[in-house]
Image (tube, rainbow, N blue to C red):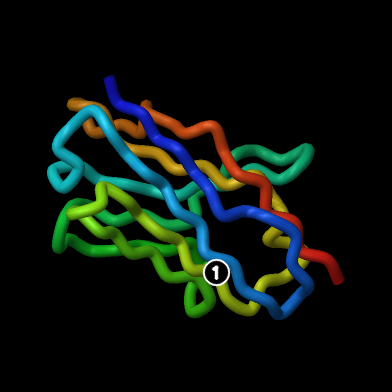
Amino acid sequence: QVQLVESGGGLVQAGGSLRLSCSASGRTFSNYAMAWFRQAPGKEREFVASNEWSGGNTYYADSVKGRFTMTRDNGKNTVYLQMNSLRPEDTAVYYCATEDEGGSYNYWGQGTQVTVSS
């Protein structure tokens, strides 16, 4: 079965950086799109970034473009989200997700909390 485990969250001051990791298991990692989403208190879950498949395009939400970078290491079955110039509005639980056979993001990790203080 597909399992995703996020790590790397924490508390950081505005302007700081964090790198999130998502370790995947249970399938051939490189064949599927991976994505990061986030959910702030009282708000709906929102898209942050995605990578279509190994060597494919990477997409970002406008709110993080130029500050966040998503990469993947197929040898380690891991994706990363490097977050720079963090802002208080980036505070949220960050989730890693991967698509099912139908192309929908239906596999999710447990989430990791990111808190940015002003």
Residue 98: give x, y in percent of width and height. 32, 38
Q: Compare residues 118 and 62 and report the one nearer the observer.
A: 118
In the image, residue 92 above or below residue 110: below
Q: Residue at x 58, y 76 (%)?
A: 84
Q: Residue at x 45, y 53 (%)?
A: 21
Q: Is residue 41 left or right of residue 112?
A: right
In the image, residue 89 above or below residue 26: below
Q: Amino acid at mark 1?
A: Met
SS of the residue under disc 1 = strand
- Numbered disc total: 1
Looking at the image, which residue sits at the far right?
A: 118
Looking at the image, which residue sits at the far top?
A: 1
Instruction: Read off the residue under disc 1.
Output: 83
Q: Quadrant of the N terminus?
A: top left
Q: Quadrant of residue 87?
A: bottom right
Residue 48: give x, y in percent of width and height. 49, 55
Q: Residue at x 18, y 52 (%)?
A: 53
Q: Is residue 38 left or right of residue 54?
A: right
Q: Residue at x 76, y 74 (%)?
A: 14
Looking at the image, which residue sits at the far front?
A: 76
In the image, residue 61 above or below residue 76: below
Residue 31: give x, y in percent of width and height. 13, 43
Q: Is residue 117 left or right of residue 72?
A: right
Q: Is residue 51 left or right of residue 113?
A: left
